[in-house]
Image (tube, rainbow, N blue to C red):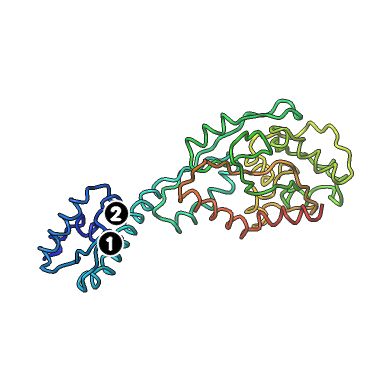
Amino acid sequence: MSHAQLQLTALRALEAAARLLSFKAAAQELHVTPTAISHQIQQLERSLGVELFVRVHRGLTLTPAAQACLPHIRDGFASLRAAVIAIQEYKDVGTLSVSAPPSFAMRILMPLSQEFLAQYPDIDLRITTRMRVPVQEAARPQDETETFRSWAEESDIVIVLGKDGFGDLDAEELMPLSVQLVCSPGLLENGAGLRDAADVQHYPWLHDDRGLKYGGAPFWDQWLSSQGVSPREHGHGAHFNHAAMAIEAAVKGMGLLVTTPCLCWKELRNGELITPLEHAVPIENSYFVLNRRTQRPAAELFKQWLRARLQERSLVANVSDALAAG
């Protein structure tokens, strides 16, 4: 018999009947009639020219020929199942959509995405940005479940900045956050000096307004209060609703900035920005990953990969150090 003439249906009937030693039980498992199983086995015996079963009272026994071929048949079906699973997993990889706040997407996801695509070339990564509706009253909780649920329907991975308002969605903390004072080295060269927190009054301030947007206090207020300096009204200086813009302004030497250092890790590493005072202050808001009830394998893969990259670059470790110091 040639490979082209192999009948998978008959071989499946043989495997089931041999395992169960019953045409009736094999028929029930395969959702056919016992007559169909018997007919398939007879056709296979004629094609192979050997007897496969000996009919005995109330059952069956295997012939030596059936016993010899059965392990190979089982291995064959196992290989076929593995092939189908491989096809399904490959098909599932495809396009992976990730939505995140604009600054997180620009400052973290985009620099890291090249590494991910190099490591997983079969995944077509698509990054979009989404912004939450700002909280108007700092003390008022805000349930944005419907908004987040719609985002989760449209994207495989949803990253948000916040502390609550996730409703019944599964929310995994991706990384806790701290705020720290950063500035361009050139700003201090021509300034009055910066020995402690009280000296910040001698410099212009830049404002990363994310502290107020989602039910918290201004980053400047949180940082100054932690140093025992009473927050004061300091209106001059530019305000930015995206951290990325505030960081760019700081790089250009436009003023001092209190922000989350994880978003300017590249500038801190290459010296475009420095932390003149090392004090870091943990804040209530964190970056969270909002989960669908069922996750594609590619989405789980991306989450594990992202956590590992954040840890490697000490973006999470720096916050942990701040928490321990606090």
Measured as percent of width and height from the top left, residue 13 is found at: 23, 57
Q: Is residue 83 left or right of residue 157?
A: left
Q: Nearer the viewer, residue 241 or 138?
A: 138
The quarter of the picture where residue 54 lies is bottom left
Q: Residue at position x 79%, y 54% from top?
A: 278
Residue 248 against residue 18 in the figure, above or below: above
Measured as percent of width and height from the top left, residue 10 is found at: 19, 57
Q: How many marks?
A: 2
Residue placed under numbered mark 2 in the picture = 25
Q: Is residue 183 left or right of residue 102?
A: right
Q: Secondary structure at mark 2?
A: helix
Residue type beneath disc 2: Ala
Residue type beneath disc 1: Leu
Q: Is residue 37 left or right of residue 160?
A: left
- Within 10 Å of the Cα at label 2, are there few (<14), some (14-19), or many (20+) other Cα atoms? some
Residue 151 against residue 316 in the figure, above or below: above
Measured as percent of width and height from the top left, residue 273 is found at: 69, 52
Alpha carbon of mark 1 to alpha carbon of mark 2: how far? 8 Å
Q: Are marks 1 and 2 in contact (CB under 8 Å)?
A: yes
Residue 18 against residue 274 in the figure, above or below: below
Residue placed under numbered mark 1 in the picture = 21
Residue 176 against residue 313 in the figure, above or below: above
Residue 145's disc is none
Q: Residue at position x 69%, y 36% from top?
A: 210
